[in-house]
Image (cartoon, rainbow, N blue to C red):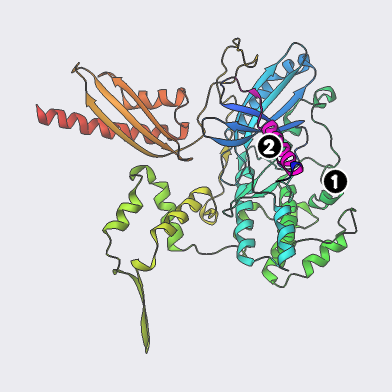
Amino acid sequence: MSSSKKKGNKSKEEESEDECEVLEESPCGRWQKRKEQVNQGSIPGIESTYLAMDTEEGVEVVWNELHFPDKKIFKAHEEKIRMMFDNLMVLDHPNIVKFHKYWMDIQETSARVVFITEYVSSGSLRQFLKKTKKNRKSMNARAWKRWSTQILSALSFLHSCDPPIVHGNLTSDTVFIQHNGLIKLGSVWNRIFANELPVPDELRSPLKVQREQNRDLHFFPPEYGCVADDTAVDIFSFGMCALEMAVLEIQCNGDSRVSQEAITRAGQSLEDENMRDFILQCLSLEADKRPTAHNLLFHRVLFEVHSLKLLAAHCILNNQDLMPESWLEERTKVIDQNTIIAEIERKNKPVIEWRYSQVSSLELDKFLDDVRNGVYPLMNFASSRPHILPHGFSQHQEETQHTKTPTPEPVEVETRKVIQMQCNVEETDDTKRWHLTLFLKLEDKLHRQLSCDLFPTDTSQDIASELVQYGFIHEDDFQKLASFLEEIFHKHRSTLLGAH
């Protein structure tokens, strides 16, 4: 190897090491900020976005910083800002980039809010469409339907919150596609920041007013910026994303804004009448004539009667806490592979048969993972019900001195759901007490083992309440865990009575 090549390789290695250098840690030490900056879509107001490491989960995340140069103004509105971030913490949907954590770092004259979000490494919708266009002339109709359904699933969730959340920045740059076909909407907090931060111009200064690039202006409807934000804004933006997905690219002249004529030509070029009608409804210039995200899921181009396989998968996942982790593997072992699953009788033709040997357990396992991750939502069956955002959701710790950053984080709140639970109760040497061991598996496959001694006065409700209070389980899992523990306690008491 020549000396020039050696120097080149060494330079790349040094550059990579520099990017991995840890610049800062969160107060709890879990999140480590790196030198490498990342771009996760257009997010006005966020001055710095860095790649970071979640040392607990071993995955990369995004470290975002929102700066306030005037501490006095920040302190005057601190509670409102805190409430805004608390509400973002409870937004939980498989097709929305996850908001993991936030904390406030208050200095002598300035302040900043640091928040951690999910890192989507696979790239944006715009990047994917650009690559696809090089290799083919049209988008696969099945992929178009799957992606449209996932985007609408996320918008329907946001719009059904109380109060409704308007994305307000939906473009092909803020929609991300993972390797398994899972869609993620980023920049959800864009309009929340713009609307929720205090009105005075001096406090809005950290939210830099960035002029939209010409290439993105066609994603926004005529009323954008002229009237108060409404969910119809997102429907127009979604319609433009759907059109771009269908035609791969809407032609424009150089770097100028995409014209209305170009949009009209792209819409008329669609051969599928149902797809054309669907997109044109979204792109109506009159906001009140655009359908809701929920209603669009019932449009004939998307709506379908879900297969029994998909319904069964959702049923399994919704009741997974009642099943052991290796349930699928154990079930497939005891099944006779020659057993007929289903058959279709045909007049004057041989019967069509399906046997277990034709279905791979590995394929089923992957399908369950895809359903769990949100690739195949059942939004067509869901009613449009409000998701109420709690105010002042997390408790605030008293500020204490830290060596890492001067301002502590709020009390940890568990945002992941429990998908499986197991429990073991044993008598201790002191017969007046029990020893409880609880095994929990969270939706991101993290395993959590907890143990404690129980007294006769302890109830299942008390234990579940403490686990929520100290951030070990999500508040939505409170009743499920309490009922599970009550059943275990009842069985243990019955066993003890029978023994005596």
Answer yes or no: is residue 50 visible: no
Residue most extreme to the front: 2
Query: Of the numbered discs in the image, which one, if any, rests on residue 184?
Result: none
Q: Is residue 199 above or below residue 292?
A: above
Residue highlighted by disc 1 = 213
Who comes first in sequence, dot 2 or dot 1? 2
Q: Position of residue 61 (x, y in %)?
A: 62, 35
Residue 303 x %, y %: 57, 63
**What amino acid is at disc 1?**
Gln
Amino acid type at mark 2: Glu
Q: Is residue 21 magenta?
A: yes
Quadrant assignment, res 477: top left
Residue 357 % position (x, y): 35, 67
Q: Residues within 10 Å of mark 1 (few under 14, many from 20)?
A: few
Q: Which residues are magenta?
A: 4-27
Tell me, yes or no, whether the highlighted magenta stretch contains residue 388: no
Side of 233 where 451 appears, left or right: left
- Residue 104 visible somewhere in the drawing: yes
Q: Which residue is mark 2?
A: 13
Predominant secondary structure, magenta span? helix
Residue 494 drawn above or below residue 121: above
